[in-house]
Amino acid sequence: MRRVFLCAVVLLVSASAFAQQDYVGRFNAFGGYSFLDSPNSICSKMASMGRLASTSSVGLRLALTSAYSLEVHRWWQAISMLPHSSS
Amino acid sequence: MASDFNASTQQQLAPILVLLPPGATISVPFDARTSTYAIGPQINIRKLKKVTFLVRPALGALHEDVTAKPADPLTAALVAGLLGPSGKTSSTATFYGFGGGVDYFPKRHVGLRVTADFVHFAIFQSFLAAVTRYDSRLDPHFSLVAT
């Protein structure tokens, strides 16, 4: 299985390894949304998250990125009531 | 296992905590709303035609509003003792860490971004113990990209 994975990676990389990017956008905008429903006996969480981000290219290798995300979640979590230990 | 509350909060809740058996844990449902702002430089590694690897420091701030929803009289008393009758509280914290990811552009102007950020932050320091108030978050997300 590991060999198959390695071969797949090598093939993927070799297919485009000699093809450098011929177009680099100066400004990128990103939008994303995620939803999580994670029932668990210790911590149950249901969350949705929206994300907006932008990237401004300064050069080929350097960019300035900014992002805002809003996450709304409903969950419960077991809280330990034992005396606090500093260790 | 230590308490999730700091020492002063444990003192504040002492009249209630003595009623609990040793080692007790309770569960308090709550709603939370978290806004995260991040900004900083990013290094792009463009060795492949359609794939760009990116690494960056993760710097920013987050603000969280929490409303506790106690489901029984005991947790209601704990929440009221800790947060007041409204059961609401909020906290703002800065975070730092690092992140990285991959952009895949099958087309020139549309792509897919997968990133993960591993950050440290201290939130709700007023009542959470130090062992729990420093948290790390792996934040993977998929984004559609327009460029």
Image (spheres, coloured by chain):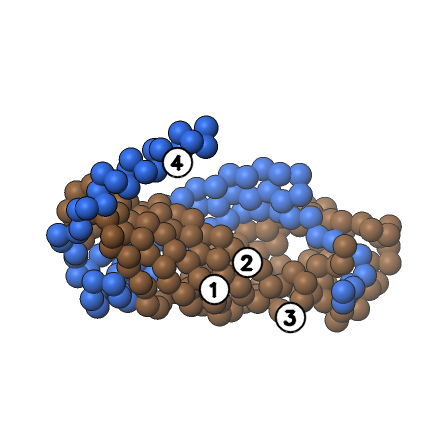
Chain colours: A blue, B brown
Residue beneath disc 4: A6
Q: Looking at the image, is B49 positioned above or below residue B64?
A: above
Dot 2: within a 10 Å radius of its alpha carbon, few (fewer than 14), some, or many (20 or more) residues?
some
Q: Mark 1 and mark 3: span between their CA atoms?
A: 23 Å
- SS state under label 4: helix
Which mark sits nearer the N-terminus, 2 or 3? 3
Q: State which chain disc 4 sits on.
A: A
Indicate the quadrant where residue A6 lies: top left
Q: State which chain disc 1 sits on.
A: B
Measuring from the top left, give residue B57's x and y in whole percent.
Answer: 40, 65
**In the image, what residue occupies the spot 58% across and 37% down?**
A39
- SS state under label 1: strand
Residue beneath disc 1: B97
Tell me whether the residue at label 4 lies in contact with that at label 3, contact meaning CB atoms closer than 8 angstroms: no
Left or right: B137 in relation to A69: right
Tell me whether the residue at label 2 lies in contact with that at label 1, contact meaning CB atoms closer than 8 angstroms: yes
Q: State which chain disc 3 sits on.
A: B
Q: Mark 4 and mark 2: span between their CA atoms?
A: 31 Å
Residue beneath disc 3: B126
- SS state under label 2: strand
Query: From the viewer's perspective, is the residue at label 4 or at label 1 nearer?
Result: 4
**In the image, what residue occupies the spot 51% across and 55% down?**
B137
Residue beneath disc 2: B136
Measuring from the top left, give residue B147's x and y in whole percent.
Answer: 18, 53
Q: State which chain disc 2 sits on.
A: B
